[in-house]
Image (cartoon, grey):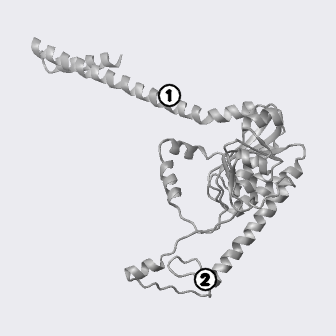
Amino acid sequence: MLWKKRRERLQASLENLGAPSAWERGLVEQVVTASLTEGRRARRWGVFFKLALLAYLCALLALLLADKFTELWAISSPHTSLVDVKGIITADSQASADKIVEGLRDAFEDTHTKGVILRINSPGGSPVQAGYVYDEIRRLRAKHKDIPLYAVITDIGASGAYYMAAAADAIYADKASLVGSIGVLLNGFGFVETLKTLGVERRLLTAGEHKGILDPFSPMNEQDRLFAKGLLEQLHQQFISAVKQGRKGRLKDDPSLFSGLFWSGEEAKALGLVDGLGSSGYVAREIIGAEKIVNYTPKDDWIKRVSERFGAGMVAGLGSALMLTAAPALR
């Protein structure tokens, strides 16, 4: 072995230097033995840490691929396809039109799909994003006439989220879900009096008479206010038209339906906003007839998923929570 060869070479070197005394030889042997023992210990720990690192990487890889293997197994037989709509609907969120539409297209194109569920838990958001999804659902339903699509509202399906749901063949919710809020808002703050109190002069230069219409440090005149109200009314009518077209006469004749109010799932059923009470599992099992559910919601790339597991996603979440916007929203 290597350590024996080293010991023999050291002993040969000592012999060339002359015969050492007994205590010197013993001391040298102890030093050599301790050095060789320490070297063997270091090598063993090195092997241990390498194996531990390999095991950790294998476990991490298995964790990342587990969902994919499960999906590959599930999609090989008839199933219900599911796409999630979670959170506020914006172009750069998980509930963006691009991500939702991507999942819907994959679900409809799977030859084993017996029905599609759009599972909604959202307070609303961008009318543009909601409109994109609404139009795509209608297009996919026309293209795949034998595959029904059902919207299932969990905690909340309001405003822009209900806009999407209205395109479904039928809408289901829990009796305690919050449903409705068919309206449009444009919100912000005015700090005109605050500037006066602080003695600050506002200097705003624009090219265009109404370019500063939403400036929070300038007063809003009556003409600008009427213009903004007219814009919101136009968007509201688009929303109402889409809901009526999607619900196809199932809505009750109640003037409060389009007032921006929202109701429990039980009340929403009585008003015709939803067709029945039930969960995604209920719809898959009892309505579609394919109890196995495969989730087609697009997932983030594996690098982002790993970083989020180590806490990097907290930074992005904090930034989103602090984001302010003055864009019209269906909420």
**Marks 2 and 1, how far apart in space?**
61 Å
The one nearer the camera, 143 or 20, is 143
- The image quadrant where one finds the N terminus is top left
Dot 1 amino acid type: Ala
Residue 305 in the image: above or below residue 247: above
Horizontal side, residue 63 vs residue 163: left or right: left
Q: Who's the residue at 46% across and 84% down the image?
A: 202
Residue for badge 1: 55
Tag shown at residue 122: none
Horizontal side, residue 52 vs residue 269: left or right: left
Horizontal side, residue 32 vs residue 234: left or right: left
| SS type, badge 2 | loop
Q: Are marks 2 and 1 in contact (CB under 8 Å)?
A: no
**Residue closest to the far top:** 22
Residue 186 in the image: above or below residue 265: below
Task: Evaluate whether residue 201 shows in this view.
Answer: yes
Dot 2 amino acid type: Lys
- The image quadrant where one finds the C terminus is bottom right
Dot 2, how many residues are within 10 Å of its Cα: few (below 14), some (14-19), or many (20+)?
few
The x, y position of residue 258, in whole percent, is: 74, 61
Q: Who's the residue at 62% across and 88% down the image?
A: 209
The x, y position of residue 305, in whole percent, is: 56, 43
Residue for badge 2: 211
Residue 294: which quarter of the image? top right
Which of discs 2 and 1 lies nearer the camera? The answer is 2
The one nearer the camera, 28 or 200, is 200
Q: Counting residues from the N terminus, which is met first, the one under dot 2 or under dot 1?
A: 1
Task: Evaluate whether residue 158 shows in this view.
Answer: no
Residue 114: which quarter of the image? top right
The x, y position of residue 66, in whole percent, is: 63, 32
The x, y position of residue 171, in whole percent, is: 78, 46
